[in-house]
Amino acid sequence: MARGSVYVNNEERAEENRTSAYTFLIVGGVGFIVIVLFFIGVIDIKVSLTSKYMITGVMGVLFLLFIVMGIISMKNFKTFKRKACKENNLTIEIKKWCMENFSQEEIDGLLEIVEQMEEEKYFQRFDHMKNAVKNQFVNLDEGYLDRLVEEVYPEVFEEENT
């Protein structure tokens, strides 16, 4: 991922897939029932026999696709849910490591931050923390790493200032 891209963690992806699955399954199921009721004549709409076959055929296929997409989204939900557990454990481990190894005085001393604008301090500190985490925990996704450092940064710098 390029810098500035938004990382979506697996827990958020799982939730998106869960809501999509329920939406597709409900719409597909209700729609398919309505099409079946229309086809067998319970719902009576005056159309020619050819139109009735065309409508029920096309709409039936569409609602079946919704049901299939719902099943696929539910499978994806389960996959992302498993990945989310692993990711959450890794996140806890990395945050714990950060809190044990980062302090404002140490980082500012290493970077020789004295009289700089707050924005410059932020970017230097951020890059230092990101590189340290990257060296300690290899093969992390750039977006995940950016998001993680953004979450840890206030705990290291802003709480110590108060």
Image (tube, rainbow, N blue to C red):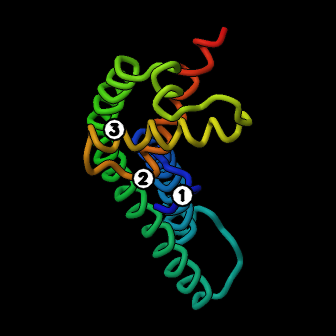
Residue at 50%, 51% in the rendered image: 20
| Between discs 2 and 3, the one toward the N terminus | 3
Foreground disc of the pair 2, 3: 2
Q: Quadrant of residue 113?
A: top right
Q: Are circles 2 and 1 on residues that touch, CB within 8 Å?
A: yes
Q: Which mark is residue 142?
A: 2
Q: Residue 39, percent across and down?
A: 52, 72
Q: Residue 149, percent across and down?
A: 48, 36
Looking at the rendered structure, the kind of residue marked 2 is Glu
Q: How busy is the neighbourhood of tag 2: few (under 14 within 10 Å), some, or many (20 plus)?
A: some
Q: Which mark is residue 32?
A: none
Q: Secondary structure at mark 2?
A: helix
Looking at the rendered structure, the kind of residue marked 3 is Ala
Q: Quadrant of the C terminus?
A: top right
Looking at the rendered structure, the kind of residue marked 1 is Arg
Estimate the spatial distance between the alpha carbons at disc 3 and disc 1, rounded to whole Å. Answer: 23 Å
Q: Residue 70, percent across and down?
A: 42, 56
